[in-house]
Image: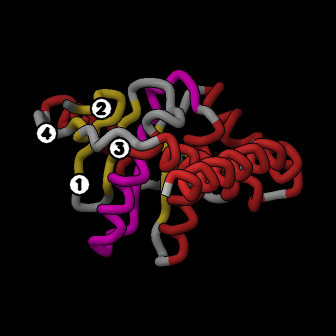
Amino acid sequence: MTDTSLTFHEFDDCLWIRCTSRGSFINSPALKSLADKYLDKGKYTIVVDMEVCPGVDSTFMGTLAGLARRCMRVGGCLQIASPTQRTRAAMESLGLDMLLDIDPPDASWQFSLEQRRQILHQDEDAAVPEEQALSELARTRHVLEAHNTLRSMNKKNDETFGYVCETLEEDLLRHSAQDDEEE
């Protein structure tokens, strides 16, 4: 099984990830896993191609922000290629444009954009392998981590996502208490 909403190819200068459906809490764990494996190899430039991505939710954006911070800590960057106006506006409204390079005009890939997409299209191994389905607890932790990243970015995000994080933390505590009772 594969997650067909994300495809990828490792080029000499970057990891290229193409999102072909809505970027959401469903495919953001796969995005994070793929990027983490690449970063663990000591490589630090990631491009997320969003040309055909119709939109993103806050979990996906929080995941992007967390990955961008990780890249920046080691001198790398996370770049966004060809976002729709709607997606760009969503990212900018939360301040992600301060962490991510959105369509940087001087990026090396700008001159080979269509060729890279063609290679990705032709590469039979480009689909992200489907990982084990996340448990409800793991998914809640992932969503909480993404939203805490967004909260930490600015006061507006802290106010916007504070209640979401509190609710998720309560869910985790309740789940932990249930696990303790079962033991």
- The amino acid sitting under disc 1 is Phe
Q: Position of residue 49 (x, y in %)?
A: 42, 38
The residue that label 1 is drawn on is 11
Which residue is rendered at x = 88% and y = 56% of the image? Answer: 155
Q: Position of residue 157 (x, y in %)?
A: 81, 49
Please, what secondary structure does the residue beneath circle 4 have?
loop
* CA neighbours of label 2 inside 10 A, class few (<14), some (14 to 19), many (20+): some
Q: Is residue 171 among the parts visible in the rendering?
A: yes
The residue that label 4 is drawn on is 125
Please, what secondary structure does the residue beneath circle 2 have?
strand
The residue that label 3 is drawn on is 17
Please, what secondary structure does the residue beneath circle 3 have?
strand
Asked if residue 150 lies in the magenta stretch, the reply is no
Q: Earlier in the sequence, mark 4 or mark 1?
A: 1
The residue that label 2 is drawn on is 3
Per the model, the C-alpha gap separating discs 4 and 2 is: 12 Å
Per the model, the C-alpha gap separating discs 3 and 2 is: 12 Å
Q: Is residue 105 among the parts visible in the rendering?
A: no
- The amino acid sitting under disc 4 is Asp
Report the coloring of the rendering.
Answer: secondary structure
User: Which of the 4 quarters of the picture holds residue 119?
Assistant: top left
Per the model, the C-alpha gap separating discs 3 and 4 is: 13 Å
User: Which of the 4 quarters of the picture holds residue 11?
Assistant: bottom left
Contact? badges 3 and 4 (CB < 8 Å): no
Q: Earlier in the sequence, mark 3 or mark 1?
A: 1
- The amino acid sitting under disc 3 is Ile
Region rendered in magenta:
31-56
Which residue is rendered at x = 32% and y = 58% of the image? Answer: 14
Q: Nearer the viewer, residue 159 or 137?
A: 137
Q: Nearer the viewer, residue 105 or 61?
A: 61
